[in-house]
Image (cartoon, rainbow, N blue to C red):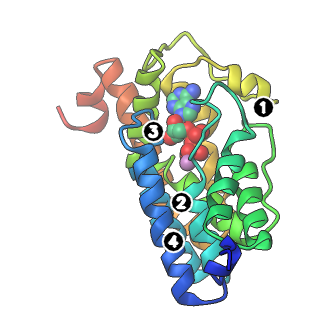
Amino acid sequence: MEINPTDRTDPTDPADRSEIVHRTVEHVRRTLEGESSGHDWWHVYRVWKNALAIAREEPADRFVVELAALLHDLSDRKLNGGDVTLGPKVAREWLAAQGVDEEILAHVCEIIADLSFKGAGVPTPMRTREGQVVQDADRLDAIGAIGIARCFAYGGHKGRLMHDPEQRPDLHASAESYYANQGTAINHFYEKLLLLAERMNTETGRRIAQGRHAFLEQFLARFYAEWEGRDGEELGLG
Ligand code: ADP
Ligand code: NI
């Protein structure tokens, strides 16, 4: 008898679910190995862990949350030549090959398609609780100490300036203008990072975001003080 992929796994069976998650971890790790612009495997690892931490406190289907977190950056617009449809497509191919049923597969791909930040003035609502959890988890990795590190790593990767006091931040009103933006790493704080804490979907995400947001503000205060050689007098560190 020919084996149909859908016969191999039963997504309602916890053992099968855990096996699929395990295989997905290995697949994503292999695919993203060596990527250095901010979407390496370790970004995905952190989003996965953040998502599980949030999902422990919020009612959400853990299987969908884990798969969407693990697969969300397999093919990113910024690195694949600007194609926003490729991310959900490669995730769909992978999940179909694992025998994941259509309902779960469609849900995971919808989350991946809707997830990303598209500019200060562009709403990015998530339809389901699972999507809200994964979006919060991804956004937590863009703020705090790790978010700062990723922001400068991305700026370096793109050959952008770290800071230019003469360039003003731009609160982009459309995804197109946000994508075309060539601004400095510090301006990215105003164009995205500082906006994320108050846009969290879940209570748990919002709580975790608070400490990370405060750290962004402390970092900026210090950065500007050091920029002008004022840190001794201003911060009492002289
Ligand atoms: P995420 O994977 O968290 O959704 P993105 O795909 O938008 O984030 O970007 C990857 C990382 O690079 C994030 O930490 C993000 O804040 C940062 N980044 C994106 N665009 C810029 C930019 N123009 N300047 C500096 N950092 C950026
Ligand atoms: Ni991401």
Query: Circle 3 — which element?
Result: loop
Query: Circle 1 — which element?
Result: helix
Left or right of residue 123: residue 134: left
Q: Which residue is mark 3?
A: 38
Left or right of residue 192: residue 15: left
Q: Which residue is mark 2?
A: 70
Q: Which residue is mark 4?
A: 21
Label at residue 154: none
Image spot of residue 207 (x, y percent): 55, 68
Disc on the earlier residue, 1 or 2: 2
Seen at 49% across and 27% down, the residue is: 186
Disc on the earlier residue, 4 or 3: 4
Q: Is residue 193 visible?
A: no
Residue 195 higher or lower than 182, as above or below: below
Left or right of residue 138: residue 114: right
Disc on the earlier residue, 3 or 1: 3
Residue 211 higher or lower than 122, as above or below: below
Query: Circle 2 — which element?
Result: helix
**Mark 1 to mark 2: distance in Å?**
24 Å
Disc on the earlier residue, 2 or 3: 3
**Mark 2 to mark 4: distance in Å?**
8 Å
Image spot of residue 68 (x, y percent): 62, 62
Q: Which three-letter amino acid code belongs to the residue tagged 1? A: Ala
Q: Which residue is mark 1?
A: 175
Q: Is residue 72 visible?
A: yes
